[in-house]
Image: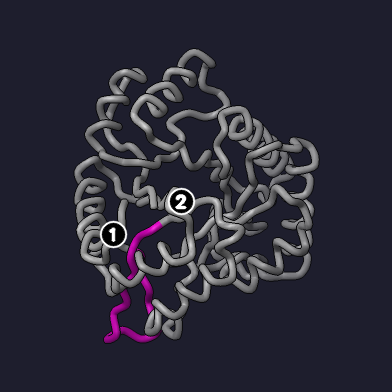
Amino acid sequence: MLLGGTVAGEWKSPAEWEKLLIASRFKAITAPFNCDTPLPEREAYLEAAQKHGVLIAEVGVWNNPLDPDPEKAKAAVDYAKRQLVLADECGVSCCVNIAGTPGTAGWDAADRANYTEETYARTIAVIREILDDVRPDTAFYCLEPMPWMVPDGPDEYLRMIRDVDRKQFAAHMDFVNMINCPRRYLAPEAFIEDCFRKLAPCIKSTHIKDSRMDPNRLTAMLEECSPGEGTLDYPEVLRIIDRYMPADAPVLLEHMQTFEEYRAAYDYVAEKAAFAGISV
């Protein structure tokens, strides 16, 4: 697997970013540019990544195509299309977003409307619109699973893939986001294996982190955390990924805030990979 993440830190130019990229030791990264980045700057980032043998694994969208404000929803869908065009032009296979919510609490919020049939039908229609308008050749539009909106499990993801029925709709793997109940938390490796067994042929990128739950608090409260700060058996998690995914599959750390936090997480995962006999 190609272990990496988002290059964190402060930079004012692609040259300064390149120094951080080298120091990160990442082999796969999220795109440090978007569709509004001037072409010469974008090309400089691409050249730097290529020079150091680093895969740009994801172009992120991260907005709400189901926003209750019609103008904001249209703007979100338009941006998703532009980001998918960008991914296709740059040879990035995964353009990733979330499904979104028709609720008003925030772009990625839990809302009872997230699970209605109306919302599901609208989600399918939006994905089809994005793909049918862009018609990417090599890039795939993917949804990151979330704890409280579809897809929130492997079977739900397979249903979405069938219902969207477009060859350039694929899967983004975030198993911690789908560990959203005590049953999955208490037998996580079996659940993670089920996710990869069912979705591996469709997965274009994977996010890794950890999960923890306070067993002394009722009702259950699950919390995302950095690898090594939760209860996942990381050597086994990495063995599962290695068993189902190709050697060049990108596996990205996420949600750390600083370069130092990413370095600590990278060191932890790399150590557990070495213990498991897996190359990263």
- Residue designated by label 2: 249
Please tell me which residue is depicted at 28% across the width and 28% down the height of the picture: 10
Magenta-drawn segment: 208-224
Disc on res. 141: none
Disc 2, SS: loop
Asked whether the residues under the numbered discs 1 and 2 touch, taking CB atoms below 8 Å apart as contact, a structural biologist would say no
**Marker disc for residue 226:** 1
On screen, residue 270 versus residue 60, left or right, reads left
Q: Position of residue 105 (x, y in %)?
A: 55, 57
Can residue 133 be seen in the rendering of this structure?
yes
Compared to 9, does 272 lie above or below?
below
> In the depicted view, which residue is nearer to us: 136 or 104?
136
Residue at the image point whose x is 27% and y is 60% from the top: 273
Measuring from the top left, give residue 169's x and y in whole percent. Answer: 68, 51
Residue 81 pos. (x, y %) = 68, 36
Say what secondary structure mark 1 lies in.
Answer: loop
Eyeballing the image, is 208 above or below 213? Answer: above
Crowding around mark 1 (Cα neighbors within 10 Å: few <14, some 14 to 19, many 20+) is many
- Mark 1 residue type: Ser
Mark toward the start of the polypeptide (1 vs 2): 1
Q: Is residue 150 left or right of residue 62?
A: right
Q: Mark 2, residues whose alpha carbon is within 10 Å: few (<14), some, or many (≥20)?
A: many
